[in-house]
Image (spheres, rainbow, N blue to C red):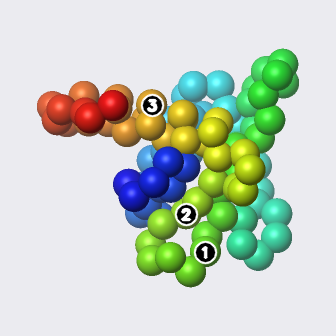
Amino acid sequence: MTEAGTLALTRLDDFASWCESNGWTREPPKGIYEVLRLVPQSTVGLRPMVFYRRDRGGHVHASYGTGTLEARWVQKWLRQRAEREGKETTR
């Protein structure tokens, strides 16, 4: 991962499945650049996580101005994945 809120396109389905098992629901993307939209099952205080594909290699990026939520979930997923694979994490 190159920056917070950035996710490899090849890992998108794994991340979405993990989020679904942690209380998020996948909705159809809106527009031509949106590739993933996840909404919380509990609507209390959380907004949808939205990822877009831009011309930056094989990565998707969190929406502008709202990347903090997405970055936290991506980091949490990466940490848990690394722990399962027996790798050390840097954060």
Q: Residues within 10 Å of mark 1 (few under 14, many from 20)?
A: few
Residue visible at 50% across and 76% down in the picture? 56
Q: Position of residue 54 (x, y in %)?
A: 61, 74
- In front of the other: 54 or 20: 54
Residue beneath disc 2: 60
> CB under 8 Å between callouts 2 and 3?
no
The residue at 38%/54% (across/down) is: 1
Q: Which residue is mark 3?
A: 76
| Amino acid identity at mark 3 | Lys
Residue hosting label 1: 54
Instruction: Determine which quarter of the picture holds residue 46.
Output: top right
> In the rendered image, is residue 79 in sight?
yes
Position of 16 with respect to 64 (left or right) is: left
- Compared with 43, 30 (above or below) is below
**Dot 2, how many residues are within 10 Å of its Cα: few (below 14), some (14-19), or many (20+)?**
many
Q: Is residue 31 left or right of residue 63?
A: right
Q: Is residue 35 left or right of residue 59?
A: right
Relative image position of residue 37 (x, y in whole percent) = 72, 51
Considering the numbered disc 1 on the image, is that residue within a helix, a strand or a loop?
Answer: loop
